[in-house]
Image (cartoon, rainbow, N blue to C red):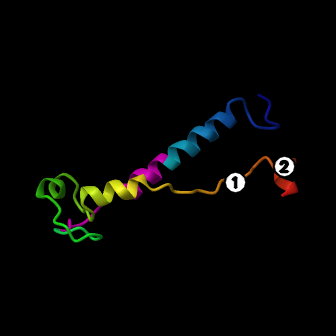
Amino acid sequence: MAGGWSRDGAVSEQIEASIADELERLKTRRAPVGESLTNCAECEEEIPEARRVAIPGVKLCIDCQQERDGRAVQRVGINRRGSKDSQLK
């Protein structure tokens, strides 16, 4: 694919780098750190000791964590192509 003055494969490398950056951001954001709570931060139920040991820094019980994971997170994308459809809105 021709990319102006860029070398062959530069676009693919940029896409792969963007994906790798996003995966790293997700891994670091989701990893709890610090001391685990004994009771859930949302419902105040006791967090089982096995969960506290398995996931250091855990703040939520299993039920609350599953509920939070099930919520749809809307992310706004950037239209880099500047298509005519996006300009008409």
Task: Please state if 31 lies on the left or on the right of 22 as rendered.
Answer: left
**Which quadrant: the C terminus?**
bottom right
Residues drawn in magenta = 23-37
Q: CA distance from mark 2 to mark 1?
A: 14 Å
Residue ID at (68%, 30%): 9
- What residue sits right under mark 1 in the picture? 78
Q: Is residue 78 left or right of residue 70?
A: right
The label on residue 85 is 2
Under circle 1, the secondary element is loop
Q: Secondary structure at mark 2?
A: helix
Farthest residue, direction left: 49
Location of residue 34 by image quarter: bottom left
Picture disc at residue 64? none
Q: Vertical placement of 14 versus 28: above or below?
A: above
Residue 82 image point, x, y percent: 82, 50
Residue at horizontal 74 percent and vertical 51 percent from the top: 79
For label 1, count other residues whose C-alpha is less than 10 Å away and answer few (under 14), some (14-19) or many (20+): few
Q: Quadrant of the N terminus?
A: top right
